[in-house]
Amino acid sequence: MIGAGLVYKALLSKLGQGLGAVLLVLALAVGIYLYGHHRGEGAVLQRLQSDRITILKDGRKIDEEALGADDTGLCALLGGCELPDGGGH
């Protein structure tokens, strides 16, 4: 019981109260950081998923354009084609 009395005295002293306040602020700061980190991670994952869906949709649209295009249309999709010198095709 003597040890418990010393612990109570230490906790109730000015130094103990100051240390307790510092630990409380530190615990709150860590909690806020972890909460923000978790929310940020979720936002990034959502953005990556959204970008992936957009890329897949754009790729599908480009594939449909390429499949339906003739030679001139394919050249236009590729940024223009130049025939080699003397080529008749």
Image: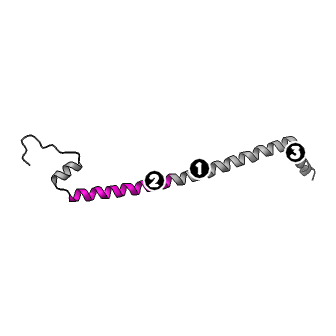
Asked which secondary structure carries label 1, the reply is: helix
- Inspect the magenta stretch and tell me whether residue 38 lies in it: no
**Relative to residue 12, is residue 86 drawn left or right?**
left
State the separation of the CA atoms marked 1 and 3. 36 Å
Q: Mark 2 belongs to which amino acid?
A: Leu
Discs 2, 1 touching: Cβ within 8 Å: no
> Which residue is at 72% across, 45% downward?
26
Please tell me which of labels 2 and 1 falls first in the chain: 1
Q: Nearest the camera: 41 or 10?
A: 41
Q: Mark 1 belongs to which amino acid?
A: His
**Relative to residue 65, is residue 24 drawn left or right?**
right
The residue singled out by tag 3 in the image is: 10
State the separation of the CA atoms marked 3 and 2. 52 Å
CA neighbours of label 2 inside 10 A, class few (<14), some (14 to 19), many (20+): few
The residue singled out by tag 1 in the image is: 37
Asked which secondary structure carries label 3, the reply is: helix
What type of secondary structure mainly makes up the magenta span? Answer: helix
Q: Nearer the viewer, mark 3 or mark 2?
A: 2
State the separation of the CA atoms marked 2 and 1. 16 Å
Please tell me which of labels 1 and 3 falls first in the chain: 3
CA neighbours of label 1 inside 10 A, class few (<14), some (14 to 19), many (20+): few
Q: Nearest the camera: 31 or 11?
A: 31
Q: Which residues are magenta?
A: 44-69
CA neighbours of label 3 inside 10 A, class few (<14), some (14 to 19), many (20+): few
> Which residue is at 28% across, 55% downward?
62
Q: Nearest the camera: 3 or 29?
A: 29
Asked which secondary structure carries label 2, the reply is: helix
Q: Find residue 16 and report its image quarter.
A: top right
Discs 3, 2 touching: Cβ within 8 Å: no
Measured from the top left, where is residue 15 in percent x and y? 85, 40
Q: How are the colours assigned in the image? A: one colour
The residue singled out by tag 2 in the image is: 48
